[in-house]
Image (cartoon, rainbow, N blue to C red):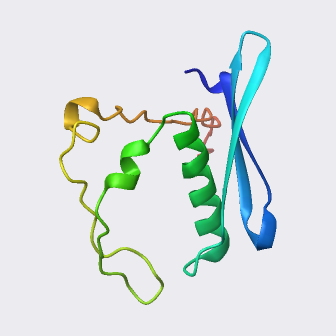
């Protein structure tokens, strides 16, 4: 799906949670599916946003396998940064041949200014 044919938005949810709507454009019409989540104990706002978006994606059939993955713990440093990479178990959805190929985004390099040296 091309980026201009989908969008997401967030709204405050009941009880301090958050709602996420993922919309897909079909022809000239936008179809939206919503789901929500509470803020989490760890990184409350980000956790709530991520959970709501993941749940809304499942409404479209995207990422359903994420709910079947086992919980895992990884080491973090004192600032909460990962010290090791979590591992995905081998499932049909996570098999290397089914993973999306990462795209590399590059920025145009501005031309260098001409310099001259008097000597």
Residue 69 lies left or right of residue 97; in this view the side is right
Rendered residue at 71%/20% (across/down): 25
Of the 4 image quadrants, the one containing the N terminus is top right
Q: In the shown orientation, is residue 58 left or right of residue 116?
A: left
Q: Nearer the viewer, residue 115 or 99?
A: 99
User: Residue at coordinates 39% horizontally, 51% vertically from top-left?
Assistant: 66
Q: What is the quadrant of residue 38 in the picture?
A: bottom right
* Res 45 → quadrant: bottom right
Q: Nearer the viewer, residue 105 or 56?
A: 56
Residue 23: image x %, image y %?
70, 32
Q: Residue furthest top?
A: 27
Residue at the bottom extreme, as displayed: 78
The quarter of the displayed image where residue 33 is located: top right
* x and y, in percent, of residue 9 in the image: 75, 45
Please state the horizontal and vertical placement of residue 74, each as a whole percent of the image: 29, 76
Residue at the spot x=43%, y=90% of the render? 78
Count of all numbered marks drawn on residues in the image:
0
> In this image, 24 relative to 14: left or right?
left
Q: What residue is at 62 percent from the left and 26 percent from the top?
A: 3
Residue 118 higher or lower than 104, as above or below: below
Task: Pinpoint residue 4: horizontal percent, then vertical percent.
Answer: 68, 23
Q: Is residue 64 left or right of residue 51?
A: left
């Amino acid at each position: 799906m091309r980026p201009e044919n989908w969008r997401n938005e967030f709204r405050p949810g009941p009880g301090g949670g958050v709602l996420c709507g993922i919309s897909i454009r079909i022809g000239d019409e936008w179809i939206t599916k919503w789901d929500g989540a509470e803020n989490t104990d760890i990184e409350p706002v980000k956790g709530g946003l991520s959970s709501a978006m993941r749940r809304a994606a499942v409404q479209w059939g995207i990422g359903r396998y994420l709910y079947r993955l086992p919980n895992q713990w990884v080491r973090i440093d004192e600032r909460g940064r990962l010290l090791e990479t979590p591992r995905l178990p081998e499932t049909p959805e996570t098999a290397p041949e089914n993973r999306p190929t990462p795209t590399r985004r590059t920025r145009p390099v501005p031309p260098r200014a001409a310099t001259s040296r008097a000597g």
